[in-house]
Amino acid sequence: MSDKDISVEELEETARQTDEQLDLMAWKMDSVDNKLVEPVNSQDMCIMNLLKSVSEVRSDYQQLRRELVEVQALQRELSSRLRSQLRLVHGKFARLRQRLAAASPPR
C-alpha cells in the first residue's frame, strides 16, 4: 500500500467517525428538544427562577466590583493630587515666611 492509499483510508475512517459523532449529536439535540417540549412543573420553574436570580446577583456583584475598582482608582488619583497641592501650599507658605522674615525690621 502506498502512502496515498493509507491517507485515503485514514480520511475515510475519520469521515466515518465524524458521521457517528454527528449522528450522536443529532440524537442528543432531539432528546433536548423533546425535553423542552415537556411541560415544566412548579419545582423546575422555581429552580429556573432561582438560577436566573443567582445569575443576576452574580452579574450585579461583578458590576459592583468594577465600580469599586474605579472608585478606588479615583480616590488614589484624588489623594495624589491633594498631596501635590499640599506640597505646593507648604512651599508657598515657607517662601512667604522667608519674605516676611526678611522684610520685617529687627527689634
Image (spheres, grey):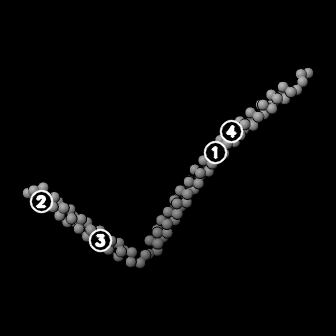
Q: Which of marks 3 and 4 is nearer the N terminus?
A: 3
Q: In this view, does 106 lie above or below 58?
A: above
Residue under numbered circle 4 = 84
Q: Earlier in the sequence, mark 1 or mark 2?
A: 2
- Depth check: 20 or 105 in front? 105
Residue under numbered circle 1 = 77
| Quarter where residue 98 is shown | top right
The type of residue carrying mark 3 is Ala
Q: Is residue 5 left or right of residue 80?
A: left
Q: Is residue 21 above or below residue 89?
A: below
Q: In this view, does 3 lie to the left or right of 64?
A: left
Residue under numbered circle 3 = 26
Relative image position of residue 97 (x, y in whole percent): 81, 30
Residue under numbered circle 2 = 5
Q: In this view, does 4 lie above or below 19?
A: above
Q: Earlier in the sequence, mark 1 or mark 3?
A: 3
**Dot 3: few (<14), some (14–19), or many (≥20) neighbours within 10 Å?**
few
The type of residue carrying mark 1 is Glu
Please name which of the two marks, 1 or 2, marks the residue nearer to the observer: 2
Relative image position of residue 35 (x, y in whole percent): 36, 74
- Depth check: 89 or 27 in front? 89
Check the picture and name the quadrant holding the N terminus: bottom left
